Image (tube, rainbow, N blue to C red):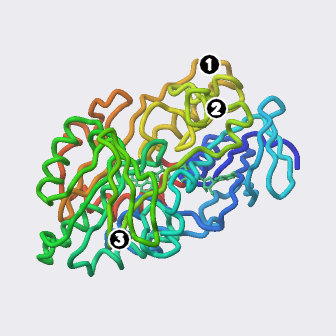
Amino acid sequence: MGRAEVLIVGGGNAGISLAARLLRDGVRDVTVVAPQPVHRYKPLLNYVAGGEASMTDLERPMAEVVPDGCTWVRDSVVAVDADALTVRTRGGRTLGCSTLVLCPGLVEDWDATPGLQQAYADGWAASSYVPGSTPVVWQRLAPLRSGTVVFTVPPEPASCAPTALKPLLMACDHWRRAGVLADLDVRLVLPAATATGIPEADRYLEETFAGYGVDVLREARVERVDWDTHALTVASPAGRRVLEDVTFAHAVPHYRAPAWIAEAGLAADSSPGLVDVDPETLRSRRHPSVWAIGDAADLATRPSGGALRKQVNVLSKNLAAAQKGKELHRYDGYTVMPITVGRRKLMLNEVDRDGRPSPSVPFLDPFVPRRWQWFFDRYGLPQVYWRRILRGRV
Ligand SMILES: Cc1cc2nc3c(=O)[nH]c(=O)nc-3n(C[C@H](O)[C@H](O)[C@H](O)COP(=O)(O)OP(=O)(O)OC[C@H]3O[C@@H](n4cnc5c(N)ncnc54)[C@H](O)[C@@H]3O)c2cc1C
């Protein structure tokens, strides 16, 4: 195979929408390397876990979403030579390019939480973040009438971590309507002192947790899981606490960047292995022909699909600008953390890199929960995703 003009590693939200956008912008030769046969619209996973969607609503064959005119190499990258601008794949290929864009997302770090993987295999733990387990979540949560249930928000790096609150709050709403909420011990393990770090959003979320009687463990991480005795050991500055006799755990695994990024010398020493790029121009600080967006890029903002709408736009313009020696465009760190707070009500939480409100609809307070936002997030956005975002039209 010859050298691709643009080689994109990863066929998720970032890789496919960028490929489509570049082809639309006139780039002739775009190759995507991605191993999986299925593409998922991940935000709907939380609705599956909350009993409001099914897996078929969020899955499409990869062959259907790879844009026309794009070469799809169904393989997995295992090494990058950033000087030579080549990647090596698990299948033994070496692929060259003029421009390399890395967007492989994050990988589960099961080793970070001993026992958790066995708990998933056992069906005692499951989460929206691990698609193979997601349908189990609502099957287990919906019929509960008593017992202890634990939910976690994963520490960063993680994909749009605050949205892990959606299954918790949808379940609490369901239990309250069923009249059983008071008979359940609901515990939430938060990696930081508050749920989002954005005061306007946290104020509302704290009231919501209190209203549902959720016991919040702060600055806390699940350190170990005893899957056979159904216990979780949680570590926090307050010490260690063992949560015993847990009926079900929506325990999200920890995440990390793929190891080959750091092995290729593309990660900053200070970051947990994410691609070291200028967070505004999206260009590697070490290799001018290497760029990165999405969950695997170190962009000093919370990764999200919503953030990708802006990143794809900036990156597409910057690849053209770099070729012509023009000034590069800048990404302001816009991101979004949609959280369902009650019966079909959702707050968008759209902010820029400094946590300032950054509403997509001008003058609309992005921290106010609204019903139409819930319906847009559940039903409208998936259509926009398949029809426009993945086709490079946003
Ligand atoms: C449960 C959940 C809920 C979410 N909810 C929201 C939400 O409500 N709103 C929102 O805006 N965002 C949400 N997000 C975040 C959003 O889905 C991600 O930010 C987005 O999918 C990131 O896209 P990506 O392409 O960087 O990574 P991914 O979507 O993870 O895609 C990575 C791709 O790279 C491929 N890949 C991995 N390794 C390799 C390799 N070595 N070689 C080649 N290919 C490789 C993978 O197979 C995959 O196709 C949610 C995420 C999750 C997990």
Few, some or many residues within 10 Å of mark 3 (<14, 14–19, 20+) = many
Q: As shown in the figure, which amino acid type bears the numbered disc 1? A: Lys
Question: As displayed, is residue 2 above or below residue 357?
Answer: below
Few, some or many residues within 10 Å of mark 1 (<14, 14–19, 20+) = few
Residue 108, image x and y in percent? 56, 54
Residue at label 3? Answer: 248
Label 3 lies in ligand 1 vicinity (Cβ under 8 Å)? no
Q: Nearer the viewer, residue 114 or 290?
A: 114
Residue at label 2? Answer: 267
Gap in angstroms between the C-alphas marked 1 and 2: 26 Å
Helix, strand or loop at mark 1: loop
Q: As shown in the figure, which amino acid type bears the numbered disc 2? A: Ala
Residue 78, image x and y in percent? 76, 49
- Mark 3 or 2: in front is 3
Quadrant housing residue 48: bottom left
Disc on the earlier residue, 1 or 3: 3
Q: As shown in the figure, which amino acid type bears the numbered disc 3? A: Phe
Disc on the earlier residue, 1 or 2: 2
Q: Residue at x 66, y 63 (%)?
A: 36
Q: Nearer the viewer, residue 251 or 38?
A: 251
Disc on the earlier residue, 3 or 2: 3
Label 1 lies in ligand 1 vicinity (Cβ under 8 Å)? no
Residue at label 1? Answer: 326
Helix, strand or loop at mark 2: loop
